[in-house]
Amino acid sequence: MDFRAYREIAWNGWWKQNPGVVQILGMCPTLAITTNIVNAVSLGLATVLVMAMSNLAVALLRNFIPYEIRIPVFILIIAALTTVVDLAMNAYLHSLYLVLGIFIPLIVTNCIVLARIEAFAAKNEPIASTLDGAMMGLGATLVLTILGAVREFVGNGTLFSGIEMVIPGAHEINVFGADYPGFLTFILPPGAFFALGCLIAGRNWLEARKLARLHANPPAAGAPETA
Amino acid sequence: MSETTIIGLSTRTAVVMTFFTAAFTAVMAFTYQATQHEIEASANEEKMKLIGEVLPGDTYDNTLLDDFVQLGPTRELGLDRGGKVYRARKAGAPAALLLEATAPDGYSGNIELIIAIKSDGSVSGVRVVAHRETPGLGDYIDPKKDKDKKSPWISQFTGLAPATLPLDQWKVKKDGGQIVSHTGATISARAVTNAVARAARYATTNHDRLFAAASGAPL
């Protein structure tokens, strides 16, 4: 594995196979927790931690896990590592833990975690697997962050509300002033679907434009083939 | 190796499974041990912070969290499964009661409250511990979500006393009482207001009985 391969893994997680807008996996937290940036980023980073750790654990143990019972073992590993993250957050980030509540244990059933173990970590060496878990997690976090920012901005007129739970003394930004009436739909679940739909459409549009440009100006002779 | 039998296969995989279970249970047990102390400390700190908001620290001098009465199911407080009443004392004399209470008629389910009633019957403070009211609409009952940070909705209970305002006036204005609520989101406010009135009545009626009970004992 060289640098290029690692870059490919990162690009896969962030853009090409982004869990949120391309694979459309792990929708429950994506739609439910993204009412503000702080919640979204916090749950995203907890997911990154679980994904990196579980991918590493499975990659290390992959030769000892019998094929027939791999799924129970994977779930066992994910559940154990999620418990570790859950306990650690309860102990050291207590107020944030109270806000994220049930969504931390629910990382166990976030299908993107099992999907990456099955598709990647079960077949690849530990370093690449850890990187894949972390990058896929970051790709999901990116989508969570954008959704959280849009919904908080439109729905509440604020940014970073609740930041004092993570960084004591920091304050939220009140973009429109205290008189902003709010746009309730964006805080409620329909807003999540709407914002996610726009995000998926935006990414598809960018991809389509790239493809169209490639067709309009085929790469010059001698340039490396990209198809 | 001979032909795989069902028993042979299941025994082998069960052994592997058991091994993994033991290994990862050990990981969890280790983390539990390592974080247990911190978790207890932060849970207590959380509780004391909330108590500090409803009952100023200089109104009592006992160890509040250790001086409580365990209530069974109490309808007056909306407690279906019972709860705790903490007793604040100053120099040994009763100062205030800190009641856990539930408003069962919120817009979406129960609203858990903590209510501090001073020994003269007046309200020292009220806070929402847990609720599922509509974000941006009914959730102003929780001062963390209330847009008015200077005088949040729930602060109008502070200082309310049966001596100056009869208990049957402790209702939202829509019901003919004196408590202001936000237009279009009365249900959440009504639920909290009625729960506070019930708790105030309960605390006054049972004041002496609650303070006389032994600490930690069920009532």
Image: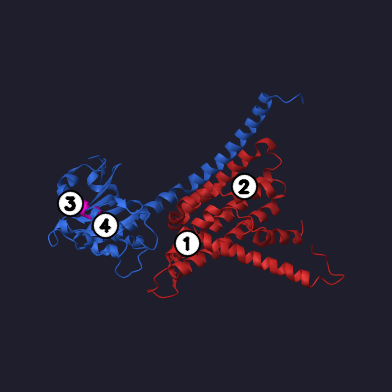
The residue lying at 53 percent from left, 43 percent from top is B28
Marks 4/1: CA distance? 26 Å
Residue at 69%, 45% in the rendered image: A122
Q: Earlier in the sequence, mark 2 or mark 1?
A: 1
Question: Which of the two marks, 3 or 1, is nearer to us in this view?
Answer: 1
**Number of dots carrying numbers:** 4
Query: Which residue corresponds to mark 2?
Result: A114
Chain ID for label 3?
A: B
| Residue density around tag 4, few if under 14, some if 14–19, many if 20 or more, within 10 Å | many
Q: Which residues are magenta?
A: B195-202
Specify the principal SS of the magenta part: helix
Colour of the chain lettered A: red
Disc 4 chain ID: B
Specify few, some or many for label 2: CA neighbours under 10 Å numbering under 14, 14-19, or 20 or more.
Answer: many
Q: Which residue is mark 1?
A: A35
Residue designated by label 3: B201
The circle drawn on residue B190 is: 4
Left or right? Give the position of A205 relative to B73. right
Q: Which quarter of the image is occupied by the C terminus of chain A?
A: bottom right
Find chain B in the image and tell me its colour.
blue
Give x and y (percent) for residue A98. 43, 54
> What mark, if any, has residue B177 been given in the picture?
none
Q: Position of residue B68 (x, y in %)?
A: 26, 46
Residue A19: x percent and y percent? 62, 56
| Element under disc 4 | helix
